[in-house]
Image: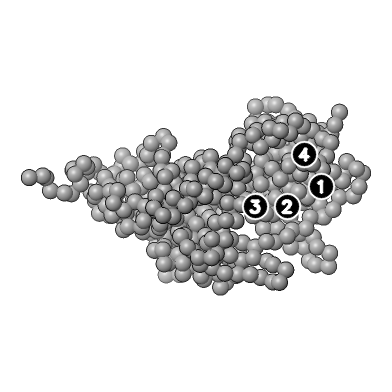
Amino acid sequence: MRPHVLIVGCGFGGLEAARALCGSRGADVDITVVDKTNHHLFQPLLYQVATAGLSAPSIAAPIRQLFRRQRNVTTLLGEVIAIDAQARIATLKDGARLRWDHLIVAAGATHSYFGRDEWAAFAPGLKTLDDAFEIRRRVLGAFEAAEREDDPARRAAWLQFVVVGAGPTGVELAGTLAEIARHTLPGEFRRIDPRQARILLVEGGPRVLASMPERLSERAREQLAALGVEVRLNTRVTGIDAQGLDLGTADGPQRLPSRCVLWAAGVAASPLGRVLAETADCALDRAGRVVVAPDLSLPGHPRIQVIGDLAAAHSHVPGREPRPVPGVSPGAKQMGRCAAANIRRQLRGEATQAFRYADYGNLATIGRHSAVVDLGTPAGALRFSGYFAWLFWLFAHVYFLIGFRNRFVVLLDWAWAYWTYDRGARVVPGGMPAALSAASPARDVAGGDRPPAA
């Protein structure tokens, strides 16, 4: 029997590992890919689904379709809940057991509310398609509720949108919300002016996009302000409930009424990290990520490799100090290829190699014609912002999408949105939020505040 490689998770790292193992120079192995969903998701554009700019199939691809021509790849829909490192058995949530000779764990990450998990009900994060649909429902539902509201204070709370966390996801969400309010929705309501919506971006640190150089961070803040986003720095969230959130500022505590709060402030490693810590006696860092050896394996378990957001990995370049690998998609892809290459080396009886991360830089878009780019090139750092950075961001993301169809559809949708400001994916499955019923009934919903016809 051929060796069996089990890959847990089909995000960027898991998909890249599977492709590397079954490519033209792949290993003579059988591969099983297990994922909680039936699709691979292009997460960098997930906020576009949440804000109705793209439909879900444009950034997702069925996993079975991706491997339909690879006869040695089996795809399973399921969730791994236990891993026996000694017996080499993984147990699924439904009780099924999978034996493996080599294991790659690429289970990713989830939201972190810094110990305040009760906030999740009032401030959804953005990691999955379900999260994106929930955010879309809440954003569009807030405008609908404001249209029905008579009380000015309650109406203002519905039209006050707060994004917590000024990393790339938070910045992109805030900028897109401003575009929706200023350009997409005006003229569609009769009792409110969507342009009066207030978009706030709350960040506990001293600047937005902290992972980027300070000059680009400041340019991003200026571009957000030009779009109408109010940025609040050095501001901590101390409480969130259905009516709004409490803030800690240099001037003291502050209450901010808002019926639509979105969370983009923190991530936590998959619970599988704790499972591995119990069964394989590995160490975890403060974020719950698995501390791996230089070759991405678990210390003492050379046949188990952890990659992607679940791994506290370092880049090992001879003559340099090891550097932490950022939790971005290029890092996950490179770890996936490294894990596959090391499995092939093990099968040939060769020594594994340490992981080396090639940093290609960071990108973030703020809105139409607004983005920041920080690239590492052989000649040094290349940093720019504005219109050309926006074009670079656009084509880079289209290039890395899975499949020609998705690339074509996304380009077409973006071109249409560019010329019309229309966001065609404003369909909300399951209806609007139940909180709509909390809005006071309008005296004349159909006619708004207009006088009766003569």
Q: Amino acid at mark 3?
A: Ser
Give the residue at mark 1. 341
The answer to whether residue 277 shows anywhere in this view is no
What's the distance in space between the residues labelled 3 and 4, CA to CA?
21 Å
- Tell me, for residue 22, which label it has, or none: 4
How many angstroms separate mark 4 from mark 1 (CA)? 11 Å
Q: Earlier in the sequence, mark 3 or mark 4?
A: 4
* Residue tagged 3: 329
In terms of secondary structure, where does tag 1 sit? helix
Label 1: few (<14), some (14–19) or many (≥20) C-alpha neighbours in 10 Å: some
Choose top left, top right, bottom left or bottom right for residue 348. top right
Q: Are marks 2 and 3 in contact (CB under 8 Å)?
A: no
Asked if the residue at tag 1 contacts the one at tag 3, i.e. Cβ–Cβ closer than 8 Å, the answer is: no
- Choose between 10 and 286: the one closer to the eye: 10
Q: Residue at x 52, y 61 (%)?
A: 390
| Pointer 3 or 1: first along the chain | 3
The residue that disc 2 covers is 334
Q: Is residue 20 above or below residue 358?
A: above
Disc 2 and disc 1 in contact, CB within 8 angstroms: no
Looking at the image, tell me whether mark 2 or mark 4 is earlier in sequence order.
4
Three-letter amino acid code at disc 1? Ala
Residue at position x 72%, y 68% from top?
A: 378
Q: Quadrant of the N terminus?
A: top right
Query: CA–CA distance between discs 2 and 4?
Result: 16 Å
**As rendered, which of 327 and 30 lies closer to the eye?**
30
Seen in the picture, residue 189 relative to 37 is either above or below; the reply is: below
Q: Position of residue 114 (x, y in %)?
A: 56, 53
Task: Please give left or right for residue 389 compared with residue 232 in the image.
Answer: right
